[in-house]
Amino acid sequence: MNGPVVLDTSVVIKWFRQGEVLAGQALALRDAYLDGHIMVSVPSLLAYELANVLRYKSDLTTGQVQEAVQSLFDMGLEWILPSSTVMRRAVEMARAYETTVYDAAFTALAELLNATFITADERLVHNLEALPFVRFMGEMEDV
């Protein structure tokens, strides 16, 4: 894979929920980042989404959710704060591609950074199929 990537929450959640479908591919992306093979940028929204999803997993304690979120920060990902540019584009994309502004924020960030957006959400990939920089993690061969 060439260039920077923006990872969707649907990918990162699999770093902490290895029993999920496509967890192997998600872990390969994590390892590629930790080994210095890829650069990963994420919107700050990812921290909230990850914590929220994990909060609803009944097999995880509050402490385990907090540890998972802390470990995400400890990885040293490039966290990008919201900007008017990204948010304007996210609203346009959400309307144009029938998706949420939350999902479109990741896509708009990837577009701004000239990065590949990787998601494990097949519905989202279908909605964004007109965008050449969007990739479904399940169809990726090289990491």
Image (spheres, rainbow, N blue to C red):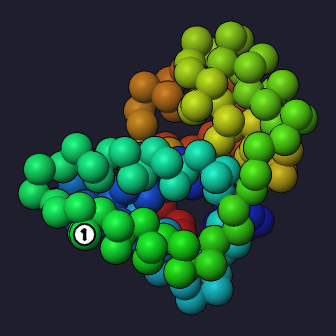
Seen in the image, is 138 located left or right of residue 99? left
Using the image as rendered, state which of residue 15 and residue 37 is in the foreground: 15
Tell me which amino acid carries mark 1.
Answer: Gln
Q: Quadrant of residue 59?
A: bottom left
Q: Quadrant of residue 53?
A: top left
Using the image as rendered, state which of residue 73 and residue 135 is in the foreground: 73
Seen in the image, is 84 located left or right of residue 15? right
Q: Percent x, y for residue 84?
A: 88, 34
Outermost residue on the left side: it is: 59
In the picture of the structure, the residue carrying the numbered disc 1 is 64
Outermost residue on the front side: it is: 62
Q: Percent x, y for residue 121?
A: 42, 37
Q: Quadrant of residue 104?
A: top right
Q: How many C-alpha atoms fall within 10 Å of the one at disc 1: few (<14), some, or many (≥20)?
A: some
In the rendered image, the quadrant that contains the N terminus is: bottom right
Residue at screen point 78% across, 17% down: 92
